[in-house]
Amino acid sequence: MGDALGLRGRDRDRNEAQRRGAVMLPNFIMIGAAKAGTTALYWYLAEHPQVFMSPMKETNYFAYGLDEQGHLLYGDPELHRFRVQSWSEYEALFTGAGDAAAIGEVSPIYLECPQAAARIRQRLPGARIVCGLREPVDRAYSDFRDHRISANPGEMTKLVQRVRQAEAMLGEPVKRVQPCELDTIAACERERAFRVSRLTC
């Protein structure tokens, strides 16, 4: 994993920093468009034994800032959450990184925030940026479906019911289901119904 991110040459510096008791900070940050797979990648990377991911997805730290009047420099208070607002809070997220080869965080908002790139470069000059993108029409449709489910509690009830059905078919719990995966669940249900109908004819 370290080689994939080009980190081999930095191992010596990291070991020295660990001996001094310094907090290990991210050596990569994932940014990206909404509905472009950043959440899935966050969870996949978090499961890797050589990777430490911030325990909080979407810290949004490098997008946070206030003007002289106390208004956000970027973002909509109704849409964006800035749970990490100080450098000490940000550092604290990585205290458990230990000797992980790759340390990262995922905050898609950095892609659209004009100030984020300069802030990342200032605080984490050696960090790599990984950007998740998606074909625009598919991304927009997925975003629309997600908002439709969020806005309609009945849709969420249907989602839960379909997840339970999928678990019954698979014989094991479903860990995480994204709204876009409903099509896959529906396809499995249709295939199963088709097989049953052929058996009963």
Image: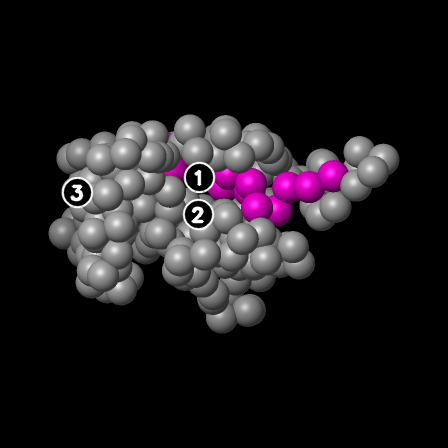
Q: Quadrant of the C terminus?
A: bottom left
Q: Which mark is residue 106?
A: 2
Rendering coords of residue 149 (x, y %): 55, 41
**Per the image, is 183 magenta?**
no
Q: CA distance from mark 2 to mark 1?
A: 6 Å
**Nearer the observer, 90 or 176:** 90
Q: Tag 1 or tag 2, which sits nearer the N-term?
A: 1
In the image, the segment drawn in magenta is: 51-66
Q: Quadrant of residue 194?
A: bottom left
Does the residue at mark 2 contact the one at mark 1 (Cβ under 8 Å)?
yes
Left or right: 58 with respect to 20? right
The amino acid sitting under disc 2 is Val
The residue that appears at 59% across and 33% down in the rendered structure is 85
The residue that appears at 65% across and 55% down in the rendered structure is 115
Provide the residue designation for mark 1.
57
**Nearer the observer, 170 or 109:** 109
Rendering coords of residue 198 (x, y %): 18, 56
